Image (cartoon, helix red, strand yellow):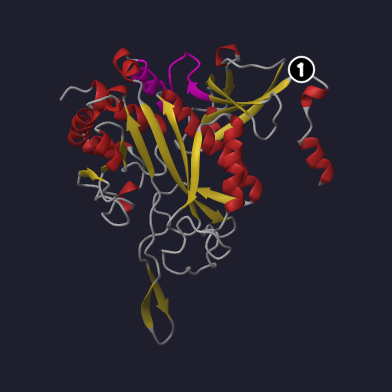
Amino acid sequence: MSLINDLINLNLSDSTEKIIAEYIWIGGSGMDIRSKARTLPGPVTDPADLPKWNYDGSSTGQAPGDDSEVIFPQAIFKDPFRRGNNILVMCDCYTPAGDPITTNKRFNAAKIFSHPDVTAEEPWYGIEQEYTLLQKEVKWPLGWPVGGYPGPQGPYYCAIGADKAFGREVVDSHYKACLYAGINISGINGEVMPGQWEFQVGPAVGISSGDQLWVARYVLERITEIAGVVLSFDPKPIQAYSLHRLSSTTTIGFLRCNGDWNGAGAHTNYSTKSMRSDGGYEVIKKAIEKLGMRHKEHIAAYGEGNERRLTGKHETADINTFLWGVANRGASIRVGRETEKNGKGYFEDRRPASNMDPYVVTSMIAETTILWKP
């Protein structure tokens, strides 16, 4: 193993100008991340200087077997795994004719973010990505007894200690790897449910927010692969109260399992230049009003299985209800007290699920609040 580690950590610049570029794209499910590597003759800093590439879309659920998808390089990050001049490349996917494939959500987002009215407002995003670490063999949260449950929620949020914080080595590795890569990761914390964590990406402007979050997800899943744990973005990984049937030759009954557990979201903080300027609080209130008018459309695009999470409990608003409030973590939209006090700032959309597509969510918020005319 020591030789393997030595080879993995070889510094290529000691012997060659060539670099390795890891091309990353989103697969057919909309949540599976795919990647493959290629050798380039030297360092590259501009995505426009990178070659396009293709892949077998029939093996990713994105194309028939007689066709191949083409990946276009869109953003470059430093590679925290290979280091040196090696890079990670976030890509989006097109047909050989040059049309975006149906799972390419970046294409439409880029159109929205390039609109002059949106560009002028410089939309900032800060995304709070929650996730759950699972034991590999049983797909049960890390730190939980196999087939059983830990003590009730309360001691685990932002906690320390071997009996309360599970997977910190993964979390801290990810934090540093993102900083190395050039991702504007702004923090991490343990979440309310044991085995669940959160990292925050931002502030990031426009389409960059989606690029950075997707690459942060990629880096995290690579680290969990090395650590031998499974990464889950399920918005409700443990159902709140499940019934298990007990049966024998003499009795039939049901056991109510211990399970009053938080879900996992991707709260999206948002502001525009007008909101950050004097008088911005009125702009914020008008934007929230528009979001309320399109609540159903946003919910439909905010992640699969979100109805299991948005129940009106565990710091969520009911999925069918739109409400906002100052410092209200049970609202659809939360405005911070500092924003209210200063008369300008940002707001937090608490509806997106942990498995949302950041290209969809960020561009939809911009479209509704800036471009849409009711």
Residue 235 vertical placement versus 40 (above, below):
below
Amino acid of disc 1: Glu
* Residue at the image position 38 percent from the left and 57 percent from the top: 262
Residue 61 visible in the current orientation: no
81 in the magenta segment: no
58 to the left or right of 123: right
**For this rendering, which residue is in front, 308 or 352?**
352
How packed mark 1 is, by other alpha carbons closer than 10 Å (few <14, some 14-19, many 20 or more), is few
Whether residue 355 is situated above or below residue 58 in the rendered picture: below
Q: Quadrant of residue 167?
A: bottom right
Q: Observer-nearest residue: 58 or 296?
A: 296
| Magenta-highlighted residues | 91-114
The quadrant of the rendering that contains the C terminus is top left
Secondary structure, mark 1, is loop
Does 372 sit above or below residue 296? Answer: above
The residue that mark 1 highlights is: 17
Residue 330, position in %: x, y? 27, 51
In this view of the protein, can residue 8 be seen by the observer? yes
